[in-house]
Amino acid sequence: MGNKLFNYRLLHQFWRVGKLYWLSQQRWKAVALLLLLLCLSLLGTGLLIAVSIFLGEMESSLAAADKNRFYQAVIIFFGVLFIGVPIISLKVYIQGKLNLFWRQWLTDYFLNKYFYQQNFYRLTAYSEIDNPDQRIAEDIQNFTQQCLYFALVISDSILQLIGFSGLLWRISQPLMMFLIIYAIAGTVVTTIAFGRILVGINLEQLKREADFRYGLIRIRDNAEAIAFYQGEVVESQELWQRFGRVFSNFTRLIRWQLGLDLFQNSYQYITFLLPTLVLAPQILSGELEIGVSAQAGVAFRSILIALGLIVSQFEQLSALAAAVTRLDELQTVMHGAQNPTRPIGHPPDALGRELDFPVSPQNIGGLRGVIPKGRDGEGCTVLNWVEDACLSFQNVTLQTPDYQTVLVQDLSFTLTVGESLLISGKSGVGKTSLLRALAGLWEAGSGTITHPERSHLLFLPQRPYMVLGSLRQQLLYPHSDRVVAKDELLQVLQQVNLTNLVERTAVLDIVEDWGRVLSVGEQQRLAFARLLLQSPQYAILDEATSALDENNQTLLYELLQKTDITYISVGHRSSLRSFHRWMLELQGGGSFMLSLIEDA
Ligand SMILES: Nc1ncnc2c1ncn2[C@@H]1O[C@H](COP(=O)(O)OP(=O)(O)OP(=O)(O)O)[C@@H](O)[C@H]1O
């Protein structure tokens, strides 16, 4: 963003993020609230002007020892307060409400995009999009809050400018001219001297804070492994390094803020003196009343605040600029190009709600088909996916996402219903990658993959995934709202040899951190129970029994063989061969051997 506070690109980014809500179906509600806010703001400004007039009036009446004039001013002053205080409070409340609605809408929008076509997975390939979690959780909040704040500050400023300019012009024209020059000079100095640097530092600070927090989350997620390795020294060093980066940038930030504060404070405190200084000759000569000085002071400072918004609000403006940039980056990357085989138009909302933004490739999309930056694009073709009843690979050449390694060259096979395939080969040869391609997660390569509807495929990944929730939710994931009788669930648990879990009373509804409580082997058996319960047409098992003893493995595969499920397994153990009909052996460098196991 070129480190400048105001440049065309930033304004463009601001428009792209801002228009999402203000052009959505909720825009009328938003506009109505905004208009209400502006009205309240107008009343508030009128109030401020009235207060300043009556303060001056009180001073003048005291100086003139006019008792009646004084009490009249006091009574009117209280009247103004009586009306004004509820208006100011209501304004704050409406501002909070509008902020909440906007944030809710924008969070919903970003979350939908984040989960659409597994963007949360694809984003991991984009190193420039650091910490999407922070962008969704915090940057949206900062963005909506700061935008509304500025909308009001600007409208207040314009109103104050109009109101107080009239007042000040009447009091002293030279003072008014002086004020305009003073405000312009302050704005120019702030933008040029501090603007370019502080926006960049603020942006960097957000990134480093999020990196530090992510480091801490990783420790929590991998606590056991780190404890076994006694890796606390290395881990704490890593965290200290991350914190060091936070610290050094923050040191730079406060150094620049010190400079800015010195300038801002001198700039602002002088204004307490300036109007009186300019008006002193006229007051001393008796041409103006003493109360005029107070009125001119309030008017002068109000106009200065209005004209010098950039000076006084500089820190908030740079924080807003950082939030805008980060949100726009995220949404731009998630827009992505589309996979031509997967029509856009029905983005899945996990909660089944109707999306209230128009659905088109321009405003909601997946990262599929986007060639990450850094590649020259030459020879960077992508796979083609076709949805059909069967599962087949036609002339598939698969590469790693960076297009550096060919994992499989020109692979063709069809897996007919009821059959099974075992994929084997040395570690790192590309077995899991083949499954990633089948799932549509990896796309670098060429050829066509025909696959049944995604809901008919169930993947059991190498590291079992345990959701946060009860055992019942665990078993039914990702269809946790399905209604299945308790007995059926218990029976399946028994089948996969998790009898110890069954014995614990009311176990199904206990919420635990199952990923921590269960052993990896138990988690693998639980994943198998999930598979048996869901009984999909196709199952893809990536070393799904690697942590189990041979007996348990045999038990599970025998259960699987009794079902109608067509399955593909990845595994190293030779004992797996007896449960499969076909074998695909990856031999490295793109070559492979496909054979019937009976023949092997
Ligand atoms: N995001 C990535 N970018 C580039 N290369 C990658 C990426 N992820 C994995 N690889 C590489 O792709 C190759 C194939 O990985 P894959 O996980 O498919 O191996 P595998 O055969 O399943 O191994 P294992 O049996 O050890 O699980 C490996 O050399 C791996 O380092």
Image (cartoon, grey):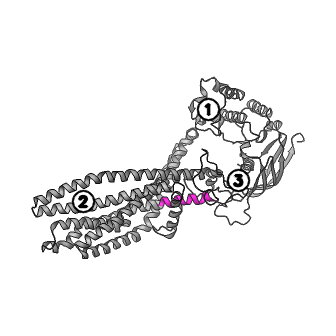
Left or right: residue 152 versus residue 434 is left
Give how far across and how far down residue 409 sits, in percent.
80, 56
Give how far across and how far down residue 39 sits, in percent.
37, 58
Q: Say which residue appears at 30% left-offset and 61% top-offset.
A: 46
Q: Secondary structure at mark 3?
A: loop
Q: CA distance from mark 1 to mark 2?
A: 64 Å
Tell me which label, 1 or 2, sits earlier in the chain: 2
Report if residue 518 is visible in the image: no
Q: Are marks 1 and 3 in contact (CB under 8 Å)?
A: no
Q: Which is in the foreground here, disc 1 or disc 2? A: 2
The label number, if any, that marks residue 442 in the structure image = 3
Up-down relation of residue 349 to residue 489 (above or below): below
Image quadrant in which the C terminus is located: top right
Between residue 381 and residue 486, name the one nearer to us.
486
Tell me which label, 1 or 3, sits earlier in the chain: 3
Q: Are marks 2 and 3 in contact (CB under 8 Å)?
A: no
Residue named by callout 2: 51
Report if residue 517 is visible in the image: yes
The label number, if any, that marks residue 471 in the structure image = 1
Region rendered in magenta: 322-338
Give how far across and how far down residue 158 sits, in percent.
36, 66
